[in-house]
Image (cartoon, rainbow, N blue to C red):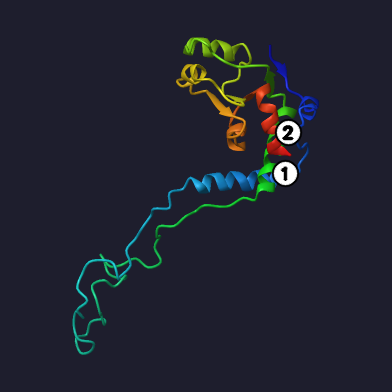
Amino acid sequence: MANTFSIEAAKAANIQVIEGHKGDQAVHDLIVAYRANRRSGTANTKTRGEVSGSNKKLWRQKGTGRARAGSVKNPVWRGGGTIFGPKPRSYAKRVPKQIRKLALRKVLGEIIGADKAVSVADFSVADGKTKSFVAAIKALTDAKKVIVVAESFDEQTYLAGRNVQSVLLMTAAEVNIEQLLHANAVILVESSFETLAKRTA
């Protein structure tokens, strides 16, 4: 049986949440960091020292009537090197632990305050069938995008839910604010409360 997870229920479970506008910047910073950390940073261009071609001076400096030129690798020329082009780099951003906690409290507070969270004593699909998994989710919420958060899931439940793209199974230790914000409804299994309480403490 599912129950709407309220702010009072969160406090009773020692899960710290934030109401109001405090924490907005923390959420922004963490989402930016998540997206930056997914960037590959493999773009690469060749400088004039790396492109192929002779280093020979093409014609003498003076007397030809043409502009002076020292190499076919000149960036001004077609096929020459690139000036200040991209090089392989890391876009990774580090977010302090306290900011991560603040962002999680803020997002949980918004979700719970908007009545998007429900709590259940347990969630599992013993037969491992997708049909049973969908029925179990439908019995709890009609939302299009759902995330189920528990301490852990058994193999049969993972097997049943792997083809349901609209539902995401996440452990309490790994779930992040980007996943929570993407969902229209969050199902919190009671086994996840202790870990969530530690992550928001």
Label 2: state its secondary structure.
helix
Which of the two residues, 102 or 166, is positioned nearer the viewer here? 102
Question: At which x and y percent is residue 75?
Answer: 31, 70
User: Disc 1 vs disc 2: Cβ atoms closer than 8 Å?
Assistant: yes
Residue at (51%, 47%) from the top-left corner? 37
Earlier in the chain: of badge 1 and badge 2, it is 1
- Height in image: 197 above or below 39? above
In the picture, the quarter occupied by the C terminus is: top right
Residue at (58%, 33%) from the top-left corner? 179
Label 1: state its secondary structure.
loop
Which of the two residues, 124 or 5, is positioned nearer the viewer here? 124
- The residue at which mark 1 appears reads as 23
Residue at (63%, 14%) from the top-left corner? 140
- The residue at which mark 2 appears reads as 109
In the picture, the quarter occupied by the N terminus is: top right
CA gap between label 1 and label 2 equals: 10 Å
**Amino acid residing under circle 1:** Gly
